[in-house]
Image: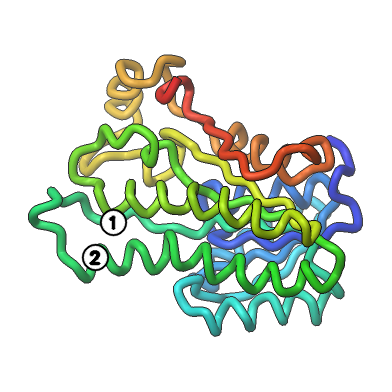
Amino acid sequence: MTNRFADKVVLVTGAGAGIGRASALAFAREGATVVASGVRPESIAETVRLIEEEGGKASAVTADVSKPEDMAALVETVVREHGALHIAHNNAGIFTKPSPVGDIDLDTWKKTFDVNLNGTLHAMQQEIVHMRANGGGVIVNTSSNIGYHGRRPGLAAYATSKAAVSTLTRIAALDHIKDGIRINSVSPGATDTTMSFRPGEDEAARAERLAGVVPLGRVGSTDEVVAAVLWLASEEAGFVVGHDLVADGGVTA
């Protein structure tokens, strides 16, 4: 491991499980002070425990990205407790029950967009306010490859919200690069989290299904996705602005 993020303060939303937890752990392993945020206090507390068990530095703040006031309080807490916010990984998202377009429950549609799209906007707006006033920073959003191909009947709400996250990222990147804020996103495909399972499916059934769908022939690991996140957040990607890095084993190739 390196110390790419030594002396950096990193905020990760949706840090209680999956890609978010893996991201928080990875940033901490590379020297960052991590603030793990999410809606389940016990889950983000566990993420912090795992980081501290490895000798890293972390704290937990409960916040709901769908609520602008929570995001304002979250960023204020990060800056008050740590003095700055250098990097944000806006990862919080939900995967709602599949439904054909003609039968989508509008409350479900609204909830999906409130978290996946509006939540990303709320987080970025607060992060940008601080970063713009303090000479810049880096933001990485989690989108999804399904926003490109849409080949999952019943997932209109999720796919559309994630396609919008990718577009929002590109526009925000151009809006704020002159403020010294570099914004990109990563779009994972099927990753080894609870979201990659279909109802009633076990690991063997998932592996068999994905072997015929993913050109690489397997599910991706959270570490593989997080490697893309950390690269985008690092100085190594200093010339990368407004990019959506797809990590999906070749599905969208």
* Spot occupied by residue 23 in the image (x, y as percentages of width and height): 64, 48
In the depicted structure, whether residue 136 falls above or below residue 160: below
Q: Is residue 28 left or right of residue 170?
A: right
**Residue 162 image point, x, y percent:** 41, 49
Quarter of the image with the C terminus is top left
**Which amino acid, by three-letter code, is at mark 1?**
Thr
Quick check: can you spot residue 31? yes
Residue at the location (25% across, 36% down)? 152
Name the residue rendered at 29%, 34% in the picture.
Answer: 202
Compare residues 242 and 35 and report the one nearer the observer. 242
Identify the image quadrant of residue 241. Answer: top right
Residue wearing tag 1? 96
Q: Is residue 51 visible?
A: no
| Nearest to the observer: residue 217 or residue 71 | 71
Identify residue for label 2.
108
What residue is at 83 percent from the left and 35 percent from the top? 1
| N-term mark: 2 or 1 | 1
Look at 79% across and 46% down and name the residue there.
29
Residue 200 location (% of width, % of height): 21, 41
Specify whether 161 is left or right of 102: right
Tell me the CA gap for discs 2 and 1.
7 Å
